[in-house]
Every structure is written in structure tokens, then in C-alpha cells.
Amino acid sequence: MAIRVLLVDDQPLLRTGFRMILEAEQDIAVVGEAGDGLQALDQVRALQPDVVLMDIRMPRMDGVEATRQITGPGRDGPAKVLVLTTFDLDEY
């Protein structure tokens, strides 16, 4: 069974690069993409990925808030969130 991954980043080129790297692995399937945190929430509900590869700094809703909502209390079998960003701020 493949690990189902959702890519969340506001940069389409980065999503494309991550997709190419991840899809080269036999046991990983990229099931969707989102360009901001609000889209990520919709995609998590619709696609139910195992892992969300999340950027921090995005328009409309940032990755920090989206992660809170995806992994917060009351979530049945929440997706795991891996935050990966090039944003250089230690507080994040």
C-alpha cells in the first residue's frame, strides 16, 4: 500500500519538484496539491492523505494554522504533517 501524500505550497514550481521526487518512489503516491492553507483543509477532507507536506508561509491561511486545524483535537485519524519551508524565521 502506497503512502498517500498531499503537497501544500504556494509555489507551483516547488510542488512540481516535490511531486517528481516523491513519485519516483514506488511506495509513495501524490494524491493532490494545494496552494494555500484553506485549499489544504479542503483537500485533506476530500482526499484523506496519510501525510501532508506543508509550507509555512502562504496566502489566505498559513501552514501553521492549517496544521493546527488538520491535527487538532477531535480529528479522527488525522494526517501527519511534515512542515518543510525555506522561510528563515526561528519562531516558525
Image (tube, rainbow, N blue to C red):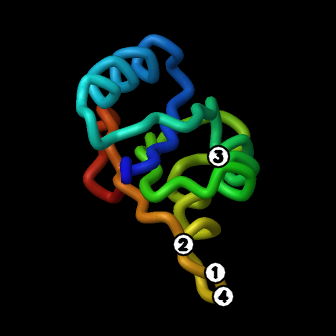
**SS assignment at label 1:** loop
| Tag of residue 75 | 1
Q: Earlier in the sequence, mark 4 or mark 3?
A: 3
User: Disc 3 to disc 2, how far (Cα)?
Assistant: 13 Å
User: Disc 4 to disc 3, how far (Cα)?
Assistant: 18 Å
| Tag of residue 74 | 4
Which residue shows up at 75% across the image and 49% down it? 42
Pointers 1 and 4 in contact (C-beta within 8 Å): yes
Residue designated by label 3: 40
**SS assignment at label 2:** loop
Residue designated by label 2: 78
Pointers 2 and 1 in contact (C-beta within 8 Å): yes
Q: Which x, y percent locates residue 17?
A: 35, 16
Look at label 4 and name its amino acid. Gly
User: Disc 1 to disc 4, how far (Cα)?
Assistant: 4 Å
Q: Classify 36 as above or below 46.
A: above
**Viewer-closest of 30 and 91:** 30
- Image quarter of the C terminus: bottom left
Look at label 2 and name its amino acid. Pro
**Viewer-closest of 9 and 90:** 9
Mark count: 4
Look at label 3 and name its amino acid. Ala
Q: Which x, y percent locates residue 2?
A: 37, 48
Q: Classify 58 as above or below 73.
A: above
Which residue shows up at 63% across the image and 80% down it? 75
